[in-house]
Amino acid sequence: MNKDQVLKAYESAREQYAQLGVDTDDAINKLDQIKISLHCWQTDDVGGFETPDAELGGGGIQVTGNYPGKARSIGQVRQDLEKVMSLLPGKQRLNLHAIYGDFKGEKVDRDQIELKHFQSWIDWAKKEKTGIDFNPTCFSHPYADDGFTLSSKNEKYRRFWIEHTKRTRKIAAEMGKQLGTPSVNNIWIPDGSKDIPVDRNKHRELLKQSLDEIFEEKYPIEYLKDAVESKLFGIGSEAMVVGSHEFYMGYAVKNNKLLTLDNGHFHPTEQVGDKISAVLQFVDEILLHVTRGVRWDSDHVVIFNDEIQYIAQEIVRADLLGRVNIGLDYFDGSLNRIGAYVIGVRAAQLAFLNALLEPTAKLRIFENGGMYFERLALLEVLKTKPFGAVYNYYCQINNVPVAEDYILEIQQYEKDVLSKR
């Protein structure tokens, strides 16, 4: 888009929002403080680099599509992430899974991973001036094939996964220390049953015991934040998931851990936006995984839809941005993977900007005064305000492509880089 057109549209938008008592420059400054963690697994369909021909498996996780250009080395993952970041305004973080270690061709089982296998990632993050979040990888492994990891009745398997998760916490803490920004280490496990189990309780007892042991080692909060993530069901765990929302909410509240709310891990009619202020009455922070559920699949590319707007509005209206850690979590191999990242981040940023442009104080006055017609009318008027012009200006002052211009950039990258892999 023409720079003068972008500026002219922004000046008009600034005037319109000013009439409502909203400072668009202030909204942009606040948006610039929101860091969204990019999930590395979108680059290669959750393959990782433990083995040359690693395949995704376990926990009902599936990636559909075989679009050309999948990253096949750590160098290619980093190249793709750098390209993504170059197309986005603001500053992002990296969310790394344990199977993405720099193993240099050596076979390293997950209970043996060390800091040295991730030091090159830390060095890369230093160069990019960003932070890293981390995750144990409790799937795509023979010891997860029976559907259970930290809640397994097979003590050999359970001990293996406990050690793996302990090591991810230690590595994540060192990431946070070296990078000067806390690393969120998020525990998600696929444990569950395809058909109706008789002894749910035993699995949940074992999971609690495993978590208690994992969290025995204490790390400074300025280095490490621990998070636990629930799921409603997965393919192969339709009848019971051990780590349900109720289980992890109870555990997080009792032990003051971050509760991870993934908006694809609940019933389709549930609204994660409604859960945020409820949960934050009882824990210090949460981790938000932004995705898009479609029927039984929880991992479609994020778009600017009602759900992401509801989530952003709740966080902004309640002034909770400082207590919410935000990351993307989806994987789609059916389209250009770089494009999937950029669409998702921009959609999330648009949602937060739109929320930041609300005249919250005025809306609250209406609500507290029982003026519900006025509240609803203003909310409806806001839907047609030119928040897109404000976002385009935000992109322009960050020297990244404005509006649809990023499409051509990604098409060129596909021609020059992805098509040659």
Image (spheres, helix red, strand yellow):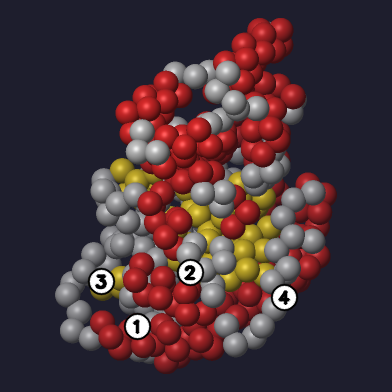
Which amino acid type is shown beneath numbered disc 2? Phe
Left-right relation of 265 to 105 = left
Instruction: Say which of 12 and 81 sits in front.
Output: 12
Q: CA distance from mark 4 to mark 3?
A: 35 Å
Give percent across and percent down for residue 115: 73, 72
Instruction: Say which of 62 and 16 sits in front.
Output: 16
**Residue marked by disc 4:** 220
Q: Quadrant of residue 214?
A: bottom right
The residue carrying pointer 1 sits among few (fewer than 14), some (14 to 19) or many (20 or more) residues within 10 Å by Cα, namely: many
Q: CA distance from mark 1 to mark 4?
A: 28 Å
Which amino acid type is shown beneath numbered disc 4? Pro
Q: CA distance from mark 3 to mark 1?
A: 11 Å
**Residue marked by disc 3:** 240
Give percent across and percent down for residue 350: 54, 32
Q: CA distance from mark 2 to mark 3?
A: 26 Å
**Residue marked by disc 1:** 204
Say what secondary structure mark 2 lies in. loop
- Residue at 38% x, 51% y is 274
**Residue marked by disc 2:** 282
